Image (cartoon, rainbow, N blue to C red):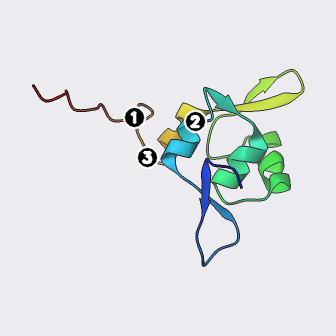
Amino acid sequence: MDSKKASTPAEDSPVWTVAGIRALGAVTDVATVGEIFGMSRSTAYELARRDRLPVPVLRVGSRYRVSVAAILAALGVPSDPPASPPPAT
């Protein structure tokens, strides 16, 4: 299993964490977006073709890419991780 995702005992499908989504980098593919939002790969690509995904899709040649910041925003999560408290002195 991918270390960015964790499974819950009640479900067979992976559950994405905020840290796992942030670890994707600046952009990701539509199949991964589908996993994050709980849809099949084919549904995610069909929605991307129709401009109906819950996030904006970037078309780069024949490929689709999605901003990780847009995914986090759609989930209501700040794109920047919380700041660490300063070290104790």
Per the model, the C-alpha gap separating discs 2 and 1 is: 11 Å
Check the image and report above or below for 29 versus 75.
above
Which kind of residue does numbered mark 3 sit on? Gly
Q: Nearer the viewer, mark 3 or mark 2?
A: 2
Does residue 52 appear anywhere in the picture? no
Density class for disc 2 (Cα within 10 Å; few <14, some 14-19, many ≥20) is few
| Residue labelled with disc 3 | 76
Task: Identify the residue at the far right of this view.
Answer: 62
Which kind of residue does numbered mark 2 sit on? Ala
Quarter assignment of residue 35: bottom right
Density class for disc 3 (Cα within 10 Å; few <14, some 14-19, many ≥20) is few
Per the model, the C-alpha gap separating discs 3 and 2 is: 17 Å
| Residue labelled with disc 1 | 81
Q: Is residue 32 left or right of residue 7?
A: right
First-in-chain label (3 vs 2): 2
Q: Is residue 87 left or right of residue 3?
A: left
Task: Identify the residue at the far top of this view.
Answer: 61
Does residue 63 appear anywhere in the picture? yes
Q: Residue at x 28, y 32 (%)?
A: 84
Q: Nearer the viewer, mark 1 or mark 3?
A: 1
> Quadrant location of the C terminus?
top left
Task: Identify the residue at the far front of this view.
Answer: 89
First-in-chain label (2 vs 1): 2
Density class for disc 1 (Cα within 10 Å; few <14, some 14-19, many ≥20) is few
Which kind of residue does numbered mark 1 sit on? Pro
First-in-chain label (1 vs 3): 3
Check the image and report above or below for 19 versus 17.
above
Q: Is label 3 in a helix, a strand or a loop?
A: loop
| Residue labelled with disc 2 | 23
Check the image and report above or below for 41 versus 64.
below
